[in-house]
Amino acid sequence: MRPSLEVADIFRRSGPQYRQTHGAALSPAQRRVMRAIESCRTAALGGHVERCDTCGHQRIAYNSCADRHCPKCQSLTRAQWLEARRAELLETEYYHVVFTVPQEIAAIAYQNKRVVYNILFRATSETLRTIAADPTHLGAEIGFLAVLHTWGQTLLHHPHLHCVVPGGGIAPTGDRWIACRPGFFLPVRVLSRLFRRLFLEQLDHAYTTGQLQFSSALAPLHEPQAFAAYVAPLRQREWVVYAKKPFGSADRVLDYLGRYTHRVAISNNRLLSMDQEQITFRWKDYRQHDKQKRMTLTPTEFIRRFLLHVLPSGFQRIRHFGFLGNRYRQAKLDLCRHLLAMTPRPPALPTRVDYRDRYEQLTGKSLRMCPVCAQGQMVRVEALPTCPTTALPGWDSS
């Protein structure tokens, strides 16, 4: 069922005015995301007419934008990705570790997204793999996936990595599995301090090699002394790294991944109301025991906050490391299964199938069944061409 209010509704109503007022500050990627969300499942992208072969009910199905920032376009992508991950799960505990950067770093990251987000991935990967390989902690090669989130519950810029890690790894000799102590992965204080050092070393390197750009309030950081003074307090502060309780089963891991991997800055079901003056949505206050609260913003501020989280084109926000790294993943996983005495993995679903059949296989929900009589099948009877210049008010063709 379509939510009563969607992010697309906000962009369609207030996007033209936002472009007119703030267009000079919008990046090409932000403009593309705005256009994609506004046009998603409208005549702008074309579509087709379907008719029930039993009762004759007709409906128009417009095409989706398939943009990864769009709240409506993640279901099938998420289901397909999760099915691939199901075949990779190991019969061991899994841990959830989160790496967060201070707000001063977040400010630099916003003006240098590709560079600083890449540093975040590299420093996190090196931290986990180094501490895990240390015989005083685990003494094994681990594997994990990391998912970049750049938002907090109120849509402000808050970059952090969520890592899902099997509770153990491959011994250096390759002949046995070394398991973590039950309920304990790695010491978070040790992780935090190494992460801080590695991150700041790489940030310093990016600065000295001219990879960082600064503007507005951060413009003075172009001067080396100003940059050094800005970063100096961060070398002494404790950085936030925390590990949650281990997952109880493989199904719990998949449930978690389904909620985190393809999430966007705000889902449509959190939106409560919209008018010309304000947008109201739900948010969860983690500092008050996850208490549900409401926040009201102007449409301009809501759009501004949403666009904070547009990623650079082609940027990979889900990455695999260690024995889950892409290059040796299959061979390493086969070794892990052997060391854990696991049964053979189930065969993957066929890839060359109609997307409607694929969606039903993965979600259990039918896109073919008639929503009126629940007996017939919806059959395509007419194609609808794209109509980009007339479908939306204030359409931006730039």
Image: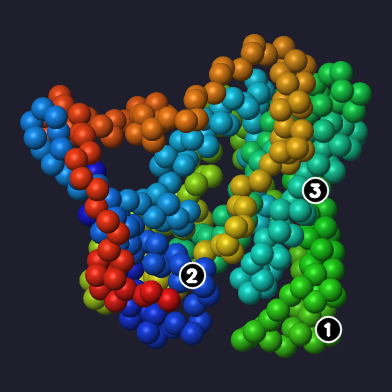
**Amino acid bearing label 2:** Gln
Relative to 393, 93 lies left or right: right
For residue 99, the mark is none
Q: Nearer the viewer, residue 370 or 1?
A: 370
Q: Where residue 81 sits: x, y (%)?
A: 53, 37
**Amino acid bearing label 1:** Pro
Query: Is 92 situated above or below 378?
Result: above
Quadrant where the image shows the N terminus:
top left
Q: Is residue 184 visible?
A: no
Q: Where residue 217 sits: x, y (%)?
A: 63, 85
Quadrant where the image shows the C terminus:
bottom left
Which residue bears the numbered disc 2?
30
Kindly identify the residue that appears in the image at 70 percent across and 79 percent down: 213
State the scheme by which the image is colored. rainbow
For residue 127, the mark is 3
Q: Nearer the viewer, mark 1 or mark 2?
A: 2
Q: Is residue 380 visible?
A: yes
| CB under 8 Å between discs 1 and 2 | no
Q: Nearer the viewer, residue 368 or 309?
A: 368
Q: Secondary structure at mark 3?
A: helix
Mark 2: few/some/many CA within 10 Å (<14, 14-19, 20+):
many
Query: Is 108 situated above or below 245?
Result: below
**Amino acid bearing label 3:** Thr
Q: Nearer the viewer, residue 177 or 262?
A: 262
Q: Separation of disc 1 and disc 2 at Cα?
A: 31 Å
Q: Nearer the viewer, mark 3 or mark 2?
A: 2
Relative to 141, 269 lies left or right: left
For residue 224, the mark is 1
Kindly identify the residue that appears in the image at 65 percent across and 35 percent down: 95
For marks 1 and 3, the one nearer the N-term is 3
